[in-house]
Image (tube, rainbow, N blue to C red):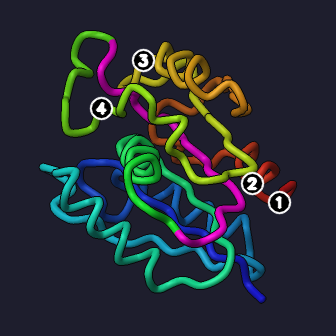
Amino acid sequence: MRKHVLFIHSAGTQGLHHGSSDLAAYLQDALGDEYNVLYPEMPNPENPEYMLWKGQIKKELSTLDGEVILIGHSLGGSVLLKYLSEESCKLPILGLFLIAAPFWGKDGDWQVKEYTLQEDFVSKLPQISHIFLYQSRDDEIVPFSHLGHYGENLPQAIARELDGHGHYFNYGVPEVIGDIKGI
């Protein structure tokens, strides 16, 4: 039976070779036929709203049965984490993989209330055995310090400090593939 992977993309244009499209294609190719990578189009990605994205995540999860692996890139990662800490998810989550996710509520320009996690968000997360965080030191959009903010709040997470991937990870990230296949 194929393992379900739900990938939530970044904000912004998502066409061919834009946004998270290259990363999503890489994940499907690198994971192979053993995994079913779902890459839904999120509502209005160029002007995203949490409530609309929350509704789309709920809809996508409702179509699945069995265990699921969740991957979020950039805004998709922070929205997934917020969703999981505020909504009920009845599916067993094999792993949560956050790639270049902004930590809202800290650091200057990252003060958008609709994306900010509740203060006690960690205590409200469902049981997730494996949480991984990935950030490239040369990310030109999300400051590298955001990886540290997540690390402070999610001490059980494995943080991967990477080089040379920028923000979009257009050429893939083998570390994610290794971590997914290792769980």
| Residue designated by label 3 | 143
In percent of width and height, residue 149 lies at 50, 18
Asked if labels 4 and 2 touch by Cβ distance under 8 angstroms, the answer is no
Mark 3–mark 2 Cα distance, whole angstroms, equals 23 Å
| Residue designated by label 2 | 177
Residue beneath the point at 57% across and 29% down: 135
Q: Residues within 10 Å of mark 4 (few under 14, many from 20)?
A: some
| Residue designated by label 4 | 116
Specify the label residue 73 is tagged with.
none
| Residue nearest the observer in this picture, 99 or 116 | 116
| Residue designated by label 1 | 181
Mark 2–mark 4 Cα distance, whole angstroms, equals 28 Å
Mark 4 or mark 2, which is nearer the start of the sequence? Answer: 4
Judged from the image, the secondary structure of the residue bearing numbered disc 1 is helix
Asked if labels 2 and 1 touch by Cβ distance under 8 angstroms, the answer is yes
Amino acid on which the number 4 mark rests in the picture: Thr
Q: Residues within 10 Å of mark 1 (few under 14, many from 20)?
A: few
Q: Is residue 144 above or below residue 100?
A: above
Q: Give the number of the mark in front: 3 or 4.
A: 4
Residue beneath the point at 87% across and 54% down: 182
Pick out the residue farthest to the bottom: 1
Q: Which residues are magenta?
A: 90-106
Q: Quadrant of the N terminus?
A: bottom right
